[in-house]
């Protein structure tokens, strides 16, 4: 049998050249897909970080003065009371991988406001489940014992305070709440919250108060905080900037950067 396979009649095996425009289009598409994947991974990582590990918050009011000032930016440890399954606390109480662990008396916590869970509040834990809380002449009693306090000089505190609070006559006290030693203040010129009836904290709930005792809407007004509402423990101030109120006519109020507060551990 004669072999007709000759170079002349054999089909060419050389690959056809792909047009440059097609190659450029493919490269753009691959680059776009790669960038979308990278961006999605970054967003997912940030969401997991905020949901499980740490989350930043800004202090909008003066209820925690002098511990936290208006304009402080804080970092909240979200695994202080147990590791949560990511995103489970967005629409309901969280599901825990480890824990949960009970907050300690004296912890400064961020939580979902029980009356409107779309709002975040920050206060200090005063009463644990089963504790009895009472306020007599502005002295806080836990389980029938007054919280330990000692008067301190508030000159430096007043210098750092927002202008809108400098008109009040404050009494400053070094206060020991649980293992936390911190400063609280009361306005001696009024009887706000001077007394509060004896109250027993329900199971899985916490009684919270602001360190600025007479200017804090807290458990004395709207009740206790369920454990499932707690987002985490405030641990550090990472930035601080005082911004004047838009409607303020006080010329003394101005933008004030407070670098000396950066890095302060929250007690």
Image (cartoon, rainbow, N blue to C red):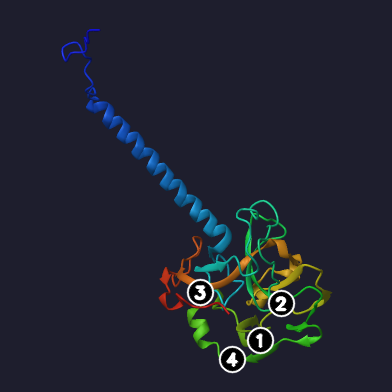
Residue placed farthest to the left in the image? 8
Decide which of tag 4 and tag 1 comes sooner along the chain.
4
Name the quarter where the N terminus is drawn.
top left
Nearest-to-viewer mark from 2 and 4: 2
User: Which quadrant of the structure image shows residue 138?
Assistant: bottom right
* Left or right for 112, reference 11: right
The front one of 129 and 134 is 129
Q: Are marks 2 and 3 in contact (CB under 8 Å)?
A: no
Q: How crowded is mark 4: few (under 14 residues within 10 Å), some or many (20 or more)?
A: few
The front one of 211 and 31 is 31
Distance between mark 2 and mark 4 Cα atoms: 21 Å
* Left or right for 213, reference 51: right
Nearest-to-viewer mark from 3 and 1: 1
Distance between mark 4 and mark 1 Cα atoms: 13 Å
Disc marking residue 184: none
Distance between mark 3 and mark 1 Cα atoms: 27 Å
Disc marking residue 152: 4
Q: Residues within 10 Å of mark 3 (few under 14, many from 20)?
A: some
Disc marking residue 163: 3
Quick check: 227 above or below 260? Answer: above
Query: Percent from the top left, x then y, of residue 131?
Result: 80, 77
Nearest-to-viewer mark from 2 and 3: 2
The front one of 59 and 264 is 264
Distance between mark 3 and mark 4 Cα atoms: 21 Å
Disc marking residue 176: 1
The residue beneath circle 2 is: 126
Decide which of tag 2 and tag 4 comes sooner along the chain.
2
* Left or right for 102, reference 171: right
User: Which quadrant of the structure image shows residue 176?
Assistant: bottom right
Decide which of tag 3 and tag 4 comes sooner along the chain.
4
């Amino acid at each position: 049998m004669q072999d007709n396979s000759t170079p002349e009649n054999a089909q060419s095996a050389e690959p056809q050249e792909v047009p440059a425009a097609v190659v450029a289009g493919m490269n753009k598409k691959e680059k776009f897909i790669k960038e979308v994947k990278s961006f999605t991974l970054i967003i997912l990582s940030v969401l997991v970080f905020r949901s499980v590990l740490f989350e930043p918050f800004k202090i909008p009011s003066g209820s925690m003065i002098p511990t936290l000032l208006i304009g402080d930016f804080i970092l909240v440890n979200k695994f202080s009371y147990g590791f949560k399954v990511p995103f489970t606390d967005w629409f309901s109480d969280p599901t825990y991988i480890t824990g949960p662990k009970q907050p300690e008396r004296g912890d400064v916590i961020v939580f979902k406001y029980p009356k409107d869970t779309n709002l975040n509040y920050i206060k200090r834990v005063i009463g644990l489940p089963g504790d009895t809380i009472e306020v007599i002449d502005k002295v806080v009693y836990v389980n029938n014992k007054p919280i330990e306090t000692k008067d301190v000089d508030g000159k430096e505190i007043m210098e750092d305070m927002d202008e809108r609070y400098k008109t009040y006559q404050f009494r400053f006290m070094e206060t020991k709440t649980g293992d936390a030693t911190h400063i609280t203040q009361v306005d001696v010129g009024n009887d706000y919250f001077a007394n509060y009836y004896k109250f027993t904290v329900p199971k899985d709930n916490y009684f919270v108060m602001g360190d600025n005792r007479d200017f804090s809407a807290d458990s004395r007004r709207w009740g206790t905080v369920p454990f499932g509402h707690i987002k985490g423990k405030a641990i550090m101030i990472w930035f601080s900037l005082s911004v004047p109120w838009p409607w303020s006519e006080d010329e003394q109020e101005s933008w004030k950067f407070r670098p000396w507060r950066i890095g302060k551990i929250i007690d």
